[in-house]
Image: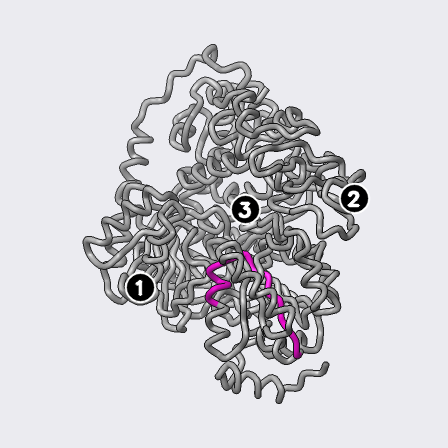
């Protein structure tokens, strides 16, 4: 069908009560109404829902909406009904008789919209039912959940790619607020979207000021209380890393103003009460884990604070995107430290155990189901490792859960074709997180990705990717350029101006809530003049190379102090620092590149009057002074753990090969032995080891600490 601009605007006004489209909505609605597949990646609050609701009505038939979020389904259904539209939903939170009634209404053509949780696709016969009354449009909401690269991967969503062909020729519109170009490619491939039409817009938030500052863990609660003590900075959401911290901080804030805690460990009735109170303005601040916020539409949130570094940039952007949806000024504050990185790596290890644990569990499985509890007792894995390993085997199609409490090895994919229950799949079994088998007796391919042995590579790749996401979040926190521009480029916004935001802590230091700045000292001005001079000689060079040249003149500066100078020059619009990469031996090497702005190329810049440097937090100078004053550790190399020495040697060799450097330039033999003897637990411990300086810690610290930590764990064999 051909959707005219007049048709679109008439329905927009008569049904939804809007006189104009938001940016980019009209194009998506028109092309979707005409029958084109598409992928919409727009931030929360940009109006993605209209992009399937309006075309669905114009196409003159029911729209199926697949969504993994019960709260969002309930919210959307209620809003559509308020508009006089016929909407229903089917998910695990509804009584069976209500779900059956929704199916009858869909069958009889009495629905405009039917929202469906993805796990319903695994119920025998359900896809056959949908096929008998094909939809006019299919919308896949929160589409990033279908991608193993997404920050919120849901294995059940993988079923969509297998089932959607049976519901064609309806066009498919995938929608998400968080998808990098890599995830976008995966969504398009999984859903087999035709035409590869993508709408990647709107990631720049013109009213949101982002501020990031390093603060030790113990100081963060006081900062949150001080920031939110000002009435104009509320309502607010504060994201805390653990349930315990959530409740403790909520209790502290409640002494000053109405506040509540929200996390998955609370009874559902209590969570619902807190959420309703927040939406109804009865409490002004919610302190929550990431369990809070999905589907929450409160336009007047003024502040979002993270009291620790999140695991992914995508998750972080989605959470700060809940501030300022009314268009009024809003702020996002991230408090982090080096310890947060280690916490995220620890949590990563709990969810993604070493491959050796998965192999051992897989080898213990057979063709006949065994009790999960009995298997756990027999293998005696460390706490939480067994559960995580089993979950990953299930997700990657290498294990099958039978009846909820038994497990067996998945059969090779090539030999599995299901017709009826028992023909390659047994009744009550699940694969990859809830894939029921079979489907009402219809013959269909029942291949399970990974059950032929490829699961090991798939798991290793995904495990590595999750660590890379932590790296990316760390780079964002340490970034010296415009925060909003960094986020916009992360998502590949196709319509962005590329200009600095003018609001964040880098662009507008004078407006920061927590960060403080001071004028540069004479010796610091001289050091910055050296940086500018070096860039005038060779503009656009990597910051690592620039630091080497800088140190030849100013040998007293370490890398952290040098980075502070770059950040200050960036704030003053003298230079810019941006990410870049190159390929080497098949590997992508990422680095940062510095270059002069047009203002930085002018002669006679007043750096003393123009540049401001960050003031150290009160606890940092003392820590640095203690570190300088501390006597060097006396280390006996005979105390070195031989196995750890070998692990470190192997790691050093791999690093040296990647960079084509001599091994000793990565870490000297003496320093390597010292690390194996001391077994450092954090960055400060590393810095106390002779031969391990700030540069080594910045480049290799995370890897060294990870190797040392792994050496202290029990051997899976």
Extent of the magenta region: 60-75
Label 3 crowd (10 A; few <14 / some 14-19 / many >=20): some
Q: Earlier in the sequence, mark 1 or mark 3?
A: 1
Outermost residue toward the left?
255
For the residue pair 555 and 690, the one nearer the viewer reads as 690
Quarter placement of the C terminus? top right
Secondary structure of residue under mark 2? strand
For the residue pair 450 and 177, the one nearer the viewer reads as 450
Secondary structure of residue under mark 1? loop
Q: Earlier in the sequence, mark 3 or mark 2?
A: 2
Q: Which mark is residue 469?
A: 3
Residue that numbered label 1 is attached to? 235
Q: Which mark is residue 417?
A: 2
Label 1 crowd (10 A; few <14 / some 14-19 / many >=20): many
Mark 1 or 3: the one toward you: 1
Q: Quadrant of residue 100?
A: bottom right
């Amino acid at each position: 069908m051909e959707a005219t601009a007049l048709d679109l605007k008439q329905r927009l006004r008569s049904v939804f009560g809007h006189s104009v489209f938001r940016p980019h909505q009209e194009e998506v609605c028109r092309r979707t109404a005409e029958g084109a597949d598409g992928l919409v990646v727009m931030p929360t609050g940009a109006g993605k829902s209209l992009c399937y609701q309006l075309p669905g009505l114009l196409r003159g038939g029911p729209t199926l909406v697949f969504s993994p979020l019960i709260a969002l389904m309930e919210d959307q259904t209620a809003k559509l009904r308020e508009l006089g539209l016929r909407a229903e939903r089917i998910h695990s939170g509804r009584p069976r008789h209500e779900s059956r009634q929704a199916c009858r209404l869909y069958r009889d053509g009495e629905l405009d919209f039917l929202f469906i949780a993805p796990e319903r696709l695994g119920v025998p016969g359900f896809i056959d039912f949908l096929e008998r009354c094909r939809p006019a449009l299919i919308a896949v909401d929160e589409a990033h959940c279908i991608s193993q690269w997404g920050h919120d991967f849901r294995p059940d969503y993988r079923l969509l790619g297998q089932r959607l062909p049976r519901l064609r020729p309806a066009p498919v519109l995938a929608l998400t607020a968080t998808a990098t170009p890599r995830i976008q490619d995966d969504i398009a491939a999984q859903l087999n979207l035709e035409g590869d039409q993508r709408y990647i817009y709107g990631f720049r938030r013109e009213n949101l000021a982002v501020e990031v500052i390093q603060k030790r863990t113990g100081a963060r609660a006081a900062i949150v209380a001080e920031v939110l003590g000002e009435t104009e900075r509320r309502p607010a959401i504060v994201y805390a890393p653990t349930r315990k911290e959530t409740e403790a901080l909520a209790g502290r804030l409640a002494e000053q103003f109405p506040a509540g805690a929200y996390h998955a460990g609370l009874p559902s009735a209590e969570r619902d009460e807190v959420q309703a109170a927040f939406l109804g303005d009865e409490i002004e601040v919610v302190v929550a884990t990431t369990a809070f916020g999905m589907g929450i539409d409160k336009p007047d949130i003024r502040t979002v604070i993270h009291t620790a570094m999140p695991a992914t940039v995508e998750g972080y952007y989605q959470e700060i995107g809940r501030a300022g949806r009314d268009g009024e000024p809003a702020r996002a504050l991230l408090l982090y430290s080096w310890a947060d990185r280690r916490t995220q790596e620890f949590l990563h290890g709990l969810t993604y155990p070493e491959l050796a644990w998965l192999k051992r569990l897989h080898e213990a499985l057979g063709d006949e189901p065994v009790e999960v509890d009995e298997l756990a007792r027999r293998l005696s894995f460390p706490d939480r490792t067994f559960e995580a390993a089993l979950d990953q085997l299930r997700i990657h199609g290498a294990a099958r859960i039978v009846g909820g409490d038994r497990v067996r090895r998945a059969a090779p994919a090539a030999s599995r074709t299901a017709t009826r229950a028992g023909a390659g799949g047994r009744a009550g079994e699940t694969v990859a997180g809830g894939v029921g088998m079979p489907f009402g007796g219809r013959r269909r391919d029942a291949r399970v990705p990974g059950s032929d042995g490829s699961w090991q590579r798939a798991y290793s790749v995904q495990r590595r990717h999750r660590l890379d996401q932590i790296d990316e979040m760390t780079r964002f926190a340490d970034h010296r350029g415009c925060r909003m521009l960094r986020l916009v480029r992360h998502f590949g916004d196709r319509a962005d101006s590329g200009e600095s935001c003018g609001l964040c802590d880098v662009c507008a230091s004078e407006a920061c809530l927590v960060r403080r700045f001071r004028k540069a000292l004479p010796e610091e001005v001289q050091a910055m003049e050296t940086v500018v001079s070096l860039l005038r000689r060779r503009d656009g060079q990597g910051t690592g190379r620039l630091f080497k040249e800088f140190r030849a003149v100013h040998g007293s500066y370490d890398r952290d102090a040098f980075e502070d100078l770059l950040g200050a020059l960036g704030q003053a619009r003298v230079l810019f620092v941006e990410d870049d990469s190159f390929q080497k031996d098949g590997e992508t090497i990422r680095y940062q590149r510095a270059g002069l702005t047009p203002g930085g190329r002018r002669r006679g810049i007043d750096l003393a009057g123009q540049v401001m440097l960050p003031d150290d937090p009160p606890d940092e100078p003392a820590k640095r002074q203690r570190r300088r004053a501390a006597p060097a550790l006396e280390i006996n190399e005979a105390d070195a753990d031989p196995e750890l020495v070998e692990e470190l040697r192997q790691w050093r060799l791999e690093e040296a090969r990647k960079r084509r450097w001599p091994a000793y330039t990565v870490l000297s033999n003496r320093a390597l032995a010292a690390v194996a003897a001391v077994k450092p637990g954090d960055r400060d411990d590393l810095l106390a080891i002779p031969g391990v300086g700030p540069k080594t810690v910045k480049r290799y610290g995370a890897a060294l600490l990870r190797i040392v930590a792994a050496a202290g764990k029990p051997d899976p064999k």
